[in-house]
Image (spheres, grey):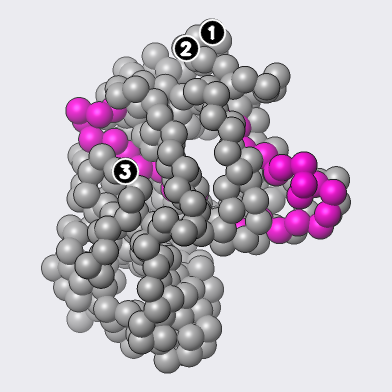
Amino acid sequence: MSNITQLLTPHIKDLGGFNARRSLPHDECMMVGPFIFFDHLGPAVFPPGKGVDVRPHPHINLATVTYLFEGVLLHRDSLGRVQEIHPGAVNWMTAGRGIVHSERSPQSDRVIESTLHAIQTWVALPEEYQETEPSFYHYPTEDIPSWTENGVAGALIAGEAMGKKSPVKTLSPIIYLDLCFTSGGKFILNPDYSERAIYTVTPGIMIDGKELEQHRLAVLSADTKVEITANTQARCVVIGGEPVGKRHKWWNFVSSHPERIEQAKQDWQAGKFEQVPGETEFIPLPDNL
């Protein structure tokens, strides 16, 4: 019997000059553990003079997690934080009661041909932390636990696994792994969390001996060990954790209370969110989604 309960094909979203493969939320699966949003960005190649320009936009009741495979992004937010993120580092931004941020290519990347390849996720906050004060934390690559074993180079982006604990501060039990395989590499994923999923960044990933297509999110059954192997150089990402309950999502807003999302819509349209210092643009509230 397969340990895969759902195999999700992402929707392609145009983010303005480059595409994202969006696996969560999905018509067949809203969340995996606390993860309610999963985007695989790129790899996108920008010629000199071009780059990423995600204008300021708001979030509530969630945390955003940015993790790069390649490239550089410049984060700015309404707390006044300005931070470049590089491959292997982690940006964790807790929106709580509300935050605004932008993501752009830094000037150093705009004068050359540059590539962006990344995973962006949103983590729904537990009920008791949804309206917490917003915060931002950056964790450099050297602070993220990493290891090489059985032909697999792993990085523990967040949570606990392999007897290791990531320094990334989370508000609920979570697992988030980056796994790079050589041909013949093997990794055993233990049933330490109620909900888990594996995303195939590249071809060549096999789950319990069955090869998966590239760009698929395989949702796993609970309480079972899963063997991840590769028949070539390959990469996958593991997400999961403990569920935090039902959530509603509209645009960039997530909450367990629909009326809170309605309030956030009104607040953004009325200009009541705090602004990002140094930014003059913003993304208007969509008319419909």
- Please tell me whether mark 1 sits on a helix, a strand or a loop: loop
| Amino acid type at mark 1 | Ala
Q: Local crowd at mark 3 within 10 Å, few (<14), some, or many (≥20)?
A: few
In the displayed structure, 252 sits above or below 106; it is: above
**Residue 116 inside the magenta-drawn segment:** yes
Residue nearest the observer in this picture, 250 or 174 = 174
| Amino acid type at mark 3 | Lys
Query: Comparing marks 2 and 3, which lies closer to the viewer?
Result: 3
Residue at the disc numbered 1: 270
Q: Kindly identify the residue that appears in the image at 67 percent across and 22 percent down.
A: 279
Give the CA distance from mark 2 to mark 1. 5 Å
Q: Quadrant of the N terminus?
A: bottom left
Query: What are the residue bounds of the magenta stretch?
Result: 101-130
Give the CA distance from mark 2 to mark 3. 28 Å
Residue at the disc numbered 3: 169
Residue at the disc numbered 2: 267
Q: Local crowd at mark 2 within 10 Å, few (<14), some, or many (≥20)?
A: few
In the displayed structure, 203 sits above or below 173; it is: below
- Furthest toward the front, the residue is 142
